[in-house]
Image: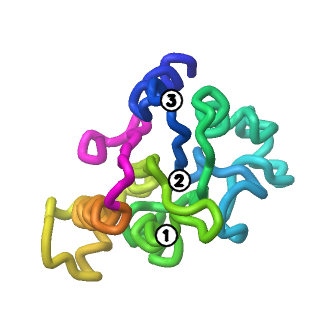
């Protein structure tokens, strides 16, 4: 965990003394009940669900990876738009349609009317695409259709393009979880 946080601090530019604002676009690893926006996003951490409590060791928001990063860097959280079980693409577990929770559905909600735009966007995704066996598709960088977004690669390309164009001043950092399929990694 310390190596991960050290690396993340270097990537986010911890040496920069100016205050930075961070938004997170993530899945369950970035959730904590009461600390995601919108509030109805499903959470893995911080819930009263006995099954979830037995299967993780995060008990307080201060134990989440992103809370530790904020504390270590002094950066401000603009928005944490994370959703447990979400995929980057529209295809979820058992081939179900996850368009309502996909990263590419939520990527337009990373700024805040009071806190403003993020300077850094941390994207932690692909985990559920890998575990659900979502279709890979082909890397596509233009003319991406809705149908194509049911596959990981075109959806990921679409997401990165959208983030770059709609948050032009933000540094976008993609964090890849361990133990994922080679195609996702």
Residue at 43% x, 23% y: name it: 7
| Chain part drawn in magenta | 168-185
Q: Nearer the viewer, residue 6 or 145?
A: 6
Q: CA distance from mark 2 to mark 3?
A: 18 Å
Main SS, magenta residues = loop
For residue 162, side relative to residue 154 (left or right): right
Q: Is 168 drawn above or below residue 126 in the view shown?
A: below
Give the percent coordinates (x, y) of residue 118: 49, 55
Q: Which mark is residue 23?
A: 2
Q: Estimate how packed mark 2 is, as few (under 14), some (14 to 19) or many (20 or more) residues with alpha carbons within 10 Å.
A: many
Which mark sits nearer the N-terminus, 2 or 1? 2
Q: Is residue 110 magenta?
A: no
Pointers 2 and 1 in contact (C-beta within 8 Å)? no
Q: Quadrant of the N terminus?
A: top right
Q: Which mark is residue 106?
A: 1
Q: Which mark is residue 59?
A: none
SS state under label 1 = helix
Give the percent coordinates (x, y) of residue 129: 40, 56
SS state under label 3 = loop
- For this orientation, the residue located farthest to the top is 3
The residue indicated by pointer 3 is: 17
The answer to whether one can see residue 135 in this image is: no
For residue 100, side relative to residue 152 (left or right): right
Q: CA distance from mark 1 to mark 3?
A: 30 Å
For residue 89, side relative to residue 153 (left or right): right
Q: CA distance from mark 2 to mark 1?
A: 12 Å
Residue at 36% x, 47% y: name it: 171
């Amino acid at each position: 965990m310390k190596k991960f946080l050290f690396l993340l601090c270097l990537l986010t530019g911890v040496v920069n003394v100016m205050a930075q604002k961070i938004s997170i676009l993530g899945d369950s690893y970035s959730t904590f009940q009461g600390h995601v926006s919108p509030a109805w996003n499903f959470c893995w951490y911080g819930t009263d669900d006995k099954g979830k409590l037995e299967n993780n060791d995060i008990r307080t928001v201060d134990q989440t990876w992103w809370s530790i990063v904020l504390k270590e860097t002094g950066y401000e959280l603009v928005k944490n738009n994370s959703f447990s079980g979400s995929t980057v693409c529209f295809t979820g577990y058992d081939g179900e349609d996850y368009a309502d929770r996909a990263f590419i559905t939520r990527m337009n909600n990373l700024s805040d009317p009071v806190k403003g735009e993020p300077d850094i966007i941390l994207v932690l995704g692909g985990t559920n695409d890998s575990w659900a066996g979502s279709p890979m598709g082909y890397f596509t960088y233009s003319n991406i259709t809705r149908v194509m977004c049911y596959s990981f690669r075109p959806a990921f390309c679409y997401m990165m393009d959208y983030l770059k164009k709609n948050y032009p001043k933000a540094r976008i950092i993609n964090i890849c979880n361990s133990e994922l399929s080679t195609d996702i990694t």
